[in-house]
């Protein structure tokens, strides 16, 4: 089957229809069995009453399902309930079958109407939801494109300004300005890359080496870490996850550690039981109050894998990430 046909809304529509059909079928089965039990009891009670009346009043008119015969009737078609005044009194079996079929057909027709009405209601509800979602998606895409375009232009202008300043004077403040610019430029490019993945919300679960991803992310901060002490204690640990999600998580927490550290950054990883633990520690600089957003991003992404992030502030700022393997 074409995967495009099995979209989320189609899956919801099919599952809802199946659940409704199976549920109603079960209810109908119970209803038919209950009706059969009641109709049989009712027929037997009425037939026995008419039989007793017939003993004393042979001119009584029997209902359509009750017959009298001078000789033994066919057993397959009639059920004998007694002999009165030399005649066989019998119940027409086809009458019971006809009544049960009539009741079942009525239920079936009402079920068809109910299922069709529910399907139409669900269909138009989904269509309305999808139209609204499509509008919001397009609006958000335009908004993001506008912001990224303006921010990209701004960064380009600032790069030119920094190059002009560097060509005329080489002071420490200019180097720090260039370092800060490089960091925000990398952050901006990384954000653009993340936004592009939103076009395909399906997770690409593969086996990834956590050590390689950490080293790739750390490489983005090479210039910033030149004036700081970086300690890495890594080993090959493989997990199953979407590489983009793990890269986003690592970028968010490592960026915080690099940005808000003063002199040192320490990264260690280990595996215990069925979980991987990542420890990221940095000394506390003056700008520590700005931390928080990156950790919220990491926590949101980790929650999709059953992981979590915890922090502790003492002499150093410690971030602990737990991620199932």
Image (spheres, rainbow, N blue to C red):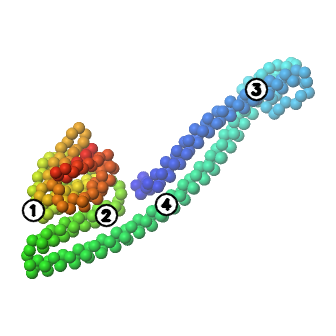
Residue located beneath label 2 in the image: 195
The answer to which quarter of the image holds residue 213 is: bottom left
The disc at residue 227 is 1
First along the sequence among labels 1 and 3: 3
In the picture, measured across the screen, residue 72 lies left or right of residue 34, that is right
Residue located beneath label 4 in the image: 129
Give the CA distance from mark 4 to mark 3.
56 Å
Q: Which percent across, then down, holds residue 169?
A: 8, 78
| Mark 4 crowdedness (10 Å alpha carbons): few <14, some 14-19, many ≥20 | few
First along the sequence among labels 2 and 3: 3
Give the CA distance from mark 2 to mark 4.
23 Å
Labels 1 and 4 touching (C-beta < 8 A): no
Position of residue 321 relative to residue 176, above or below, is: above
* Label 2 vs label 3, nearer the camera: 2
Q: Which percent across, then down, holds residue 229?
A: 9, 56
* Residue drawn where x is 23% and y is 49% of the image: 312
Q: Quadrant of the C terminus?
A: top left
* Label 4 vs label 3, nearer the camera: 4
* Label 2 vs label 1, nearer the camera: 1
Residue located beneath label 3 in the image: 44
Labels 2 and 1 touching (C-beta < 8 A): no
Give the CA distance from mark 1 to mark 3.
99 Å
Secondary element under disc 2, as helix, strand or loop, is helix
Labels 4 and 3 touching (C-beta < 8 A): no
Position of residue 236 relative to residue 291, above or below, is: above
Q: Which percent across, then down, holds residue 31?
A: 64, 36
| Pick the front one: 209 or 179 | 179
| Mark 3 crowdedness (10 Å alpha carbons): few <14, some 14-19, many ≥20 | some
| Pick the front one: 196 or 149 | 149
């Amino acid at each position: 089957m074409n995967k495009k046909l099995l979209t989320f809304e189609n899956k919801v529509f099919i599952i809802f229809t199946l659940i409704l059909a199976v549920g109603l079928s079960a209810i109908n089965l119970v209803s038919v069995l209950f009706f059969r039990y009641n109709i049989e009891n009712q027929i037997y009670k009425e037939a026995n009453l008419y039989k007793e009346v017939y003993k004393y009043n042979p001119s009584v008119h029997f209902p359509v399902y009750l017959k009298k015969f001078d000789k033994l009737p066919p057993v397959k078609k009639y059920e004998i309930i007694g002999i009165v005044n030399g005649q066989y009194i019998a119940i027409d079996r086809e009458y019971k079958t006809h009544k049960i079929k009539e009741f079942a057909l009525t239920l079936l027709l009402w079920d068809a109407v109910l299922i069709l009405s529910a399907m139409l209601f669900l269909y138009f509800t989904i269509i309305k939801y999808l139209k609204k979602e499509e509008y919001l998606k397009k609006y958000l895409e335009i908004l993001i494109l506008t912001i990224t375009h303006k921010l990209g232009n701004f960064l380009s202008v600032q790069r030119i300004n920094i190059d002009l300043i560097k060509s005329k004077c080489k002071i420490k403040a200019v180097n720090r300005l260039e370092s800060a610019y490089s960091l925000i430029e990398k952050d901006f490019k990384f954000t653009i890359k993340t936004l592009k993945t939103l076009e395909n919300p399906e997770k690409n679960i593969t086996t990834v080496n956590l050590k390689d991803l950490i080293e790739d992310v750390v490489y983005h901060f090479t210039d910033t870490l030149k004036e700081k002490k970086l300690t890495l204690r890594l080993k090959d640990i493989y997990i199953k996850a979407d590489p983009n999600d793990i890269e986003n998580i690592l970028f968010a927490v490592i960026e915080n550690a690099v940005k808000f550290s003063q002199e040192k950054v320490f990264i260690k990883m280990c595996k215990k039981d069925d979980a991987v633990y990542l420890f990221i520690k940095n000394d506390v600089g003056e700008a520590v109050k700005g931390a928080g957003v990156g950790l919220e991003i990491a926590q949101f992404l980790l929650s999709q894998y059953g992981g979590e992030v915890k922090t502790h502030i003492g002499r150093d700022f410690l971030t602990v990430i737990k991620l199932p393997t």
